[in-house]
Amino acid sequence: MALTVQIRQPGGPEVLEVVDRPVGEPGPGEVRIRHAAIGLNFIDCYHRSGLYPLALPHALGMEGAGTIEAVGEGVSHLQVGDRAAYASNPPGSYSQARVMPAQNVCRLPDAIGFETAAGMMLKGLTAQYLLRKTLPVEGLQTGDWVLFHAAAGGVGLIACQWARHLGLRLIATAGSAEKCELAVAHGAEVAINYRTENFVERVKALTGGRGVKVVYDSVGKDTFEGSLDCLAPFGLMACFGNASGPVPPFAPGVLAAKGSLYLTRATLFTHLRSREATQAMANELFDVVSSGAVKIEVHHRWPLTEVAEAHRALEARVTTGSTVLLP
Ligand code: NDP
């Protein structure tokens, strides 16, 4: 048996319910993992609210770290007793233990602790594919300007540090002066409080009127149009989230009028489609974390049973960095 957080219907944080349910044995291609720490992500709010519908009832959570308790047939990269961590679909990491597909579960280097791992797998692999695999036509080069919204959040603080490590000039946006300071302390060259300043004007001024090569936009509805106006000709608009709500439909002609822009709506799980791809991305993440180039900032911890409070805080924009739930 394991305490597990599930929803029976979409809604606010109040629909999150803690149940005690059997865990079972892993089938072919599966493992059973006992969680030591669980990552909280904004996508969990989309699942809970119904923006990203799930077949109900369904457990939530897509990121976790812990110890492998049992290994199913055909799984060769993990053994009982291994320390492991993952970002994985379908959801179900909000639990003391679970049976899950082994494909996206990686063995954890000894130097990386469970809380750090739970705070970095989904967010860090996202920063990895955004900065390293979601590129404008001629690629990103040292010294290129990029704009990263919500830069003091979970994905954001990792991206700030990784961009600095890659020699990129990252302009951050964030929702308060304190969050802006945090983004700069983690490697952003400049940070703009987009609740009080016009970020388009600031970006244009900072880049000599030209604009940035890539905008990484996870805020969605509130920033979409302004983000397009921040791009240099042939720039890439990388949409990857909807924290303020989904972007309404728009006409592709807009991209022509603003300078032959490119648009992608990227998602991590396209990149994690095979065991090999997952491990290659995780190895890069483990390297930057182990070397100290990227520090995982776990700023908030909640007991798993108080997950509703954690959701409220995330949606109220009061968290920074990563948040973990402790089973
Ligand atoms: P964060 O810790 O970044 O929290 C979200 C942040 O969004 C808030 O802290 C807030 O920062 C900002 N925000 C702006 N407008 C709103 C609003 N109206 N309501 C709430 N928050 C708002 O979350 P995560 O690190 O978990 O995820 C960051 C984003 O990346 C999310 O949108 C998530 O869905 C997306 N994502 C996408 C992935 C993909 O592959 N497509 C994978 C992982 C994450 P501030 O106050 O500074 O504005």
Image (spheres, grey):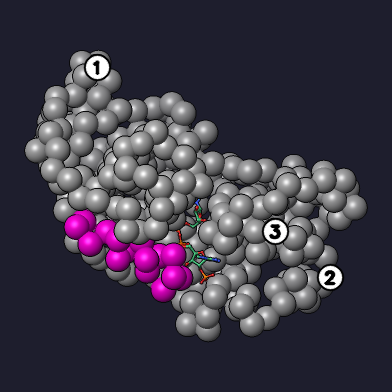
Q: Does any atom of ligand 1 lie closer than 8 Å to the CB of label 3? A: no
**Which residue is found at the position 68% from the left and 81% from the top?**
197
Q: From where the camera sits, is residue 17 visible?
A: yes
Q: Is residue 88 above or below residue 112?
A: above
Identity, as a three-letter code, of the amino acid under mark 2: Gly
Q: Quadrant of the N terminus?
A: top left
Q: Cα distance, mark 3 to mark 1?
A: 43 Å
> Which mark is first along the chain, 3 or 2?
2
Residue 168 visible at all: no
Q: CA distance from mark 1 to mark 2?
A: 56 Å
Circle 1/circle 2 CB separation < 8 Å: no
> Residue sitting at 12 percent across and 33 percent down?
22
The stretch of residues the image draws in magenta is 304-318
The numbered dot on residue 28 is 1
Seen at 67% across and 63% down, the residue is 223
In the drawing, does residue 239 fall left or right of residue 236?
A: left
Q: Residues within 10 Å of mark 3 (few under 14, many from 20)?
A: some
